[in-house]
Amino acid sequence: MTADQPNNSAPGTYAEQIKKRLTNKALHYLGRYASTSNRLETILRKFAQRKLDRADPALLNQIVREVIESCIRLGYIDDEAFIRSQFRQGLRSGFSQRRILLKLGRRGISRDLAEAVMDEQTSSAADKKDSELAAALIYARKKSVGPYSRAKLNPEDNQRHLARLARNGFAFDVAKQVMALPSADAADELLDKIYPHQLG
């Protein structure tokens, strides 16, 4: 008899069987991937639909919540640590904070929580602006934009490069600051000044 076949099974034993299967699924998934509580819930519900489709929905809901709460309690899931990690990784990759928020939203992280945790990472408005500028400079260096362009830019090129920065979520004042730098050396000097403090 399987966990989705409750006939002749004591209710407590049946619930324990379901919980064991969902816990095993959760641990298997978390052993392979960093996850959020929302993402784990999605995985467990899909598993339950496939493997436990004859189980009582109310019981399943309760057990899914219990398994997720247990994973949080044991430290297997930490949404705030996940946000901090994605924030640091995103900035190092040249992602704007807006783009990082969108990525976190797709992972099921609420915007309010993401913004609150990201704000904790930057102790002041100046720090927040510096971290965004560092990310914009990293993006510009990776994509040969603005001061990192291999060719001399004319006014039309400048507008095009400004638009590239804007499309990647950087505010206009940050994009203008990047584009105003006269050379790659000047951009590197500025990045070296703010990068270790912000992203190291």
Image (cartoon, grey):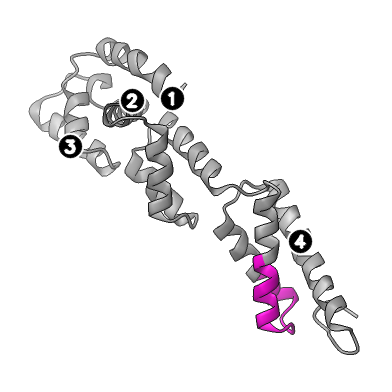
Please tell me the numbered disc located at residue 172. Answer: 3
Position of 44 with respect to 178 (left or right) is right
Is disc 1 in contact with disc 3, using a CB cutoff of under 8 Å? no
**In the image, which is nearer the foreground, mark 4 or mark 3?**
4
Tags 4 and 3 touching, CB below 8 Å:
no
Sequence-wise first label, 3 or 2: 2
Residue 198 rendering spot, x and y as whole percentages: 40, 24
- Asked whether, in this view, residue 135 is left or right of residue 160, the answer is right
Does the segment drawn in magenta span residue 165? no
Amino acid at pointer 1? Leu
Q: Is residue 49 magenta?
A: yes
Q: Position of residue 83 (x, y in %)?
A: 49, 43
Bin the neighbour count of mark 3 within 10 Å (Cα to Cα): few under 14, some 14-19, many 20 and up. few
Q: What amino acid is found at the position of numbered circle 2 in the picture? A: Ala
Give the alpha-carbon distance from disc 4 to disc 2, as whole Å. Answer: 41 Å
Residue pointed to by mark 4: 23
Is residue 159 toward the left or the right of residue 147 in the image?
left
